[in-house]
Amino acid sequence: MAIIVDVILSDDINADDDEVPEPALLQSWASASCLDCSAKKSNVKDIDLTAPGVSILISSPREIQQLNKQYREQDKATNVLSFPMQLPDDVDVQLLGDIALCAAVINEEAQQQNKPAEAHWAHMVVHGMLHLQGYDHINTNDAEEMEALETDILNTLGFGNPYE
């Protein structure tokens, strides 16, 4: 399913210097991760999401640390945060939510894990998109389900299992 992705670069991010994938790649990875909304276990309302929208913020470590502290009470930088859209039932808007990706953390993790940066970026977009659709990894069963979906989606995109 194709989706509309609005990519926003934080003021202190330079796409070239910070090795950020092209918006078209982010869009393709997000689109590949948009599952059939009627099959979701999600908090997304049952609406026809023919072209749902997602905002992706490419952030600095400082900025994502602030978001992580404010919304998750964790005072540290992280790779990805997802914010599912929460609207009243009577508002019929086709938005899944927002994803914040930290370029420095993602690129550093890729290097530490000996993964191609593009593969790790794709994984973080897929991971964030699944969170927007109601998937989580709080308990073992949910984590196994989410990891299997991530692996399947990444395989369709030509990437290997991110957990190996």
Image (cartoon, helix red, strand yellow):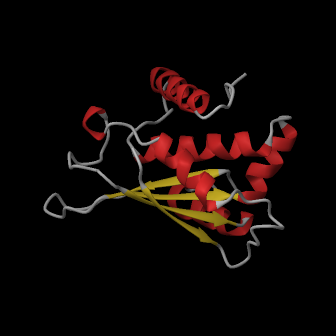
In the image, 123 versus 134, the foreground residue is 123
Vertical relation: 148 (above or below) 18: above
| Image x and y of residue 143, in percent | 52, 27
Residue at image location 63% in from the left, 67% down from the top: 66
Quarter the N terminus occupies: top left
| Image x and y of residue 85, in percent | 35, 58
| Image x and y of residue 36, in percent | 32, 36
Vertical relation: 53 (above or below) 119: below
In the image, 65 versus 57, the foreground residue is 57
Residue at image location 49% in from the left, 29% down from the top: 146
Choose top left, top right, bottom left or bottom right for residue 158. top right
| Image x and y of residue 9, in percent | 64, 71
Task: Judge from the rendering whether residue 109 lies leftward or rightward of residue 3; answer left or right.
Answer: right
Residue at image location 46% in from the left, 20% down from the top: 141
Residue at image location 86% in from the left, 35% down from the top: 114
Quarter the C terminus occupies: top right
